[in-house]
Amino acid sequence: MSKERPKTVVFGLDGAHFELLEPWIADGKLPNVEQAIKEGVSTDLHSVLPPVTSPNWKSYATGKNPGKFGIFWWENIDIDQRRIYYPSDRKNVEAEYWEVLSEIDDERPGVLGVPTTYPPKEVDEFVVSGAPDSENTGYTYPASLEHRLREEYDYQVTTKNELRATPNAAADEILDLIDIRFNVAHDLFEEYNLTFLQVTTFYINSLHHYFWDHKYTLQGWQIIDKHLGKFLDEGFDVVLMSDHGANQIECTFNINTWLEREGYLELDAGVAEFVHGLGINRDRLLRLASIIGLQDLAVRLTPQRIRDMIPDEQGQLIHESKASNIDWEKTDAVASGQGPLYITHNRNSSEYDDIREELREKLLSVKGPRGEAIVADVYRGEEVYSGQYSNEAPDLVIDQGSGIHIPGGIGRDEIFSRPEEDGWRGENKREGLFVATGPSFTQGETEPLSILDLAPTLLHLRGCSVPTDMDGEVRTDIFAEESDPDRRKPTYRQVDMKMAEKRRIRQAANQISLS
C-alpha cells in the first residue's frame, strides 16, 4: 500500500437522500454537508429491493445481492414450513469488505454502528455492532471495548424509549445516541490511528419515519453535520452514503388487506381479534408502561415473539405472529412490508405462473384514493435475486410508488389509510445518497451508483483486490484524474471456496453458542 494514500472515512447515514436535505442546505443549516457536495462528487445511490435497512446494509457490506446471503427483509416467509422468521444465523456468514481490507498488513479498519453486524465478527481493529438488530450487550469486538464505551461515554446501541409510544422522549434520546456515536468514532479513529473508518447511524432514519422534516430531524442532521466537519479539510477521503432514501408518505396501502379482499389471502385471526376487541393493543401497553416508568424494562423483558402477538391500535399483527393467523390451505399469496410478496403454490406449476402474472398485472394497475399509482414497478423474483438462496426469495417484489407506504401486517380493515394512523410520516425509497470528497475523488455529479458497487469501489480505493463473487463493479468514474485509484486498474482475486465454507461453519457454531 502506498504510504501517501489518504485515510478513508465513510459516514453511513440510514435513509439519507437529497430530497430532504436540499432545503436545509439552501438555508445554510448544513454547511459541512454542503461543502462535501460542492467540493466532491455526488449522485443517487440505488438500493437493492426492497429498500430497507435489512437487507441493504448487508448488501453494502458484502457487495452481494440478497440471494447470496438469504435475507430478504426483516422477515423471510417460508412457504413450505408455513413460518415467518428472521434468519439471523445468516448475518455473519458472508465476508464483509472490511474483513477483506483487514487482511492487508498496513490497513487498520474500524467499524462502528452498522446494522446487521450483530454479533460482531473478529475484525481488526474493532467492530461495534449497530441498531436496530443489536443487543445492548455483547456488541463489541474486542469484548473489552464494550465496558469502556459504557463507562466513558454512557454508550448504548438501542433506545430505551419507543417512538410509537413516547415520540418526544425517544427523539431526545436518539439525538444523544447520534452525538455519542460520532464522538466515539472520532476518538477511536485517532486513538487506533485507523486507515479506514466506517461509522453509521441507523436512528436518523427513525426520525425520518416519525417526524420527516420536523425540528427533531433537522437537529439530528445538524449533529451529523457538526461531526462531518471534524473530518473535512484533513486530507482524508470522506464518503457519505445511505442504504436507501426516504420520502414523505402521502398514502398507506395495506397490501395484505388488499390480497384478502381480492381473494388471495385467507386469515384465521380469531385470537388477535379477541384480544383487540378487549381493548388490548401494543401501543396502549407501551404508553401505560411509560407512564409508570417501566417502558424500558417492559421492552427488555418481553420477548419479541410475545410483543408481536399483540395487535397494534389498528388490530394489525406483524412478523412471526402472522404465520399462526393465516389459513394456509386457503391462501394463494401473502406479503411482507415494503415490497416482498410470496406465492404459496409450487413454482413448477402452471397455477403458480398464472397467479404470479395475474397479481403482477393487478398490482401495476392499483390506484390510490386520489388516483395515484401505488407501485412504480413489480419485479419477478429472478429479476432481482441470484445465488444460493434465490429459491427462498420472494416471488414478486414491489418497488413502491412515490409517497407510498406499504406495511406488511395483517388484520387491517381498510385497504388505504392515512399516514398518521400508523405513526409514520416518511417511508423508504430506492434512491439513496452518495457523496465523496477528498484527494481521490472528482467533482460534480455523476451517473447513479448501485449500493452493490460500493464494496468493490472502496476496496479498489484502498489498493485491495476485489473478490470475484461480489456483484458490484468498481466505479472508476468517481475518482479524480491522475489520483492513485484512477491510475491503477482494478485487480481481482478468486474466492477460496474452502475458506468460505469454513467461515460459514465457524459462524454457525458461534450462533449456536450464543443461542
Image: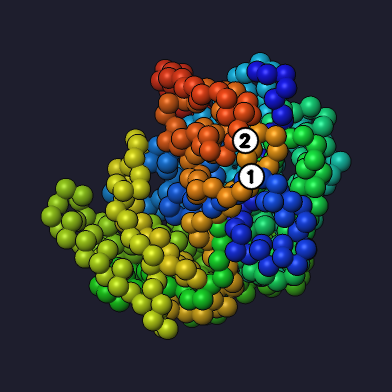
Residue corresponding to mark 1 = 443
Question: What is the residue that sits farthest to the right in this orientation?
Answer: 152
Q: Which mark is residue 345?
A: none
Q: Locate the C terminus by quadrant.
A: top right
Left/right of residue 472 with respect to residue 281 in the rendered view:
left
User: Of the residues under marks 1 and 2, which one precedes in the sequence?
Assistant: 1
- Reading the image, the residue beneath label 2 is 480
Q: What kind of residue is marked 2? A: Ala
Q: Position of residue 185 (x, y in %)?
A: 76, 40
Foreground residue among 380 and 263: 380
Q: Is residue 274 visible?
A: no
In this rendering, the answer to whether 435 lies above or below 417 is above
Q: Tell me if 102 is positioned left or right of 450 in this view.
A: right
Identify the residue at horizontal 64%, vertical 38% (top origin).
Answer: 441
Colouring used for the render? rainbow
> In the rendered image of this protein, does residue 222 appear above or below residue 455?
below
Which corner quadrant of the image does residue 237 belong to? top right
Q: Nearer the viewer, residue 37 or 99?
A: 37
Badge 1 element? loop
Contact between marks 1 and 2 (CB within 8 A): the answer is yes
Of 412 and 444, which appears nearest the observer? 444
Residue occupying the far front of the picture: 481
Viewer can see residue 172 = yes
Packing grade of label 2 (10 A; few <14, some 14-19, many >=20) is: many
Q: Amino acid at mark 1?
A: Gln
Residue at left 41%, top 83%?
A: 369
- The residue nearer to you, when weighing 446 against 482, is 482
For disc 1, the neighbor class at 10 Å (few under 14, some 14 to 19, many from 20) is some
Distance between the alpha carbons at the discs numbered 1 and 2: 8 Å
- Residue depicted at 79% across the width and 27% down the height: 193
